[in-house]
Image (cartoon, rainbow, N blue to C red):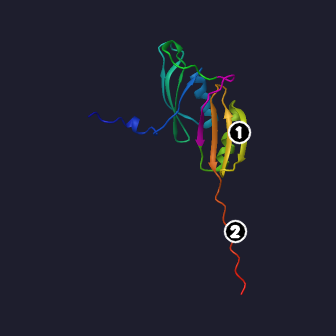
Amino acid sequence: MPARSTAASKVQPTSPYLTVRGAADAIDLYKKAFGAKEKQRMPAEDGKRLMHADLTINGGTVLLCDEFPEYGGPAAPSKERPAPVAVTIQFKKPADVDATFQRAVNAGCRSVQEPQDMFWDARFAMLTDPFGHRWFLNAPLPKKKPAPKKKAKK
């Protein structure tokens, strides 16, 4: 039985793989907007597109490539035709949602929903990047302390 690759063992069980028109530009944006770290970049034979890239965003893996219609690959989303799925970045603190949202808007993402406290006890925001991908930012709200019990009168 072949040995497992250490690279494969470091990938989380489920990772989004985005198709982007302009993957190199998307990587630059994701670095500015979400603090992405680039782990790998594989240029295509044409020297213009990327056939594969591997990023880490907030500890999670996001994979991406340019579109390759000549090989039957899917079309990338666009501003006019956004992706039907979204990537969620889960944070530990609500303040991280606010800071990341502002950084992403400053980097060129469009606000869909500004950060707000939601009924599911989380701080939440939605963005769309210039490439048509949707991003959700989410963090649990601090647990509310129960009100002190009133002492019974005797």
Quadrant position of residue 8? top left
Dot 1 alpha-carbon crowd within 10 angstroms: few under 14, some 14 to 19, many 20 or more: some
Kindly identify the amino acid type of the residue bearing the numbered disc 1: Gln
Check residue 94 for magenta coloring: no
Kindly identify the amino acid type of the residue bearing the numbered disc 2: Ala
Which residue is at 57% across, 35% downward?
36
Depth order, front residue of 105/73: 73
Check residue 79 for magenta coloring: yes
Which residue is at 64% across, 39% downward?
136
Tag shown at residue 102: 1
Q: Give the range drawn in magenta.
A: 78-89
Residue lying farthest left? Answer: 1
Depth order, front residue of 101/137: 137
From mark 1 to mark 2, how far is it between C-alphas? 34 Å
The x and y percentages for residue 75 are 57, 19
Q: In this view, does 136 lie to the left or right of 72?
A: right
Residue lying farthest bottom? Answer: 154
Tag shown at residue 35: none
Which residue is at 69% across, 22% downward?
80
Q: Main secondary structure of the magenta part?
A: loop
Tag shown at residue 147: 2
Dot 2 alpha-carbon crowd within 10 angstroms: few under 14, some 14 to 19, many 20 or more: few
Which quadrant of the figure contains the N terminus? top left
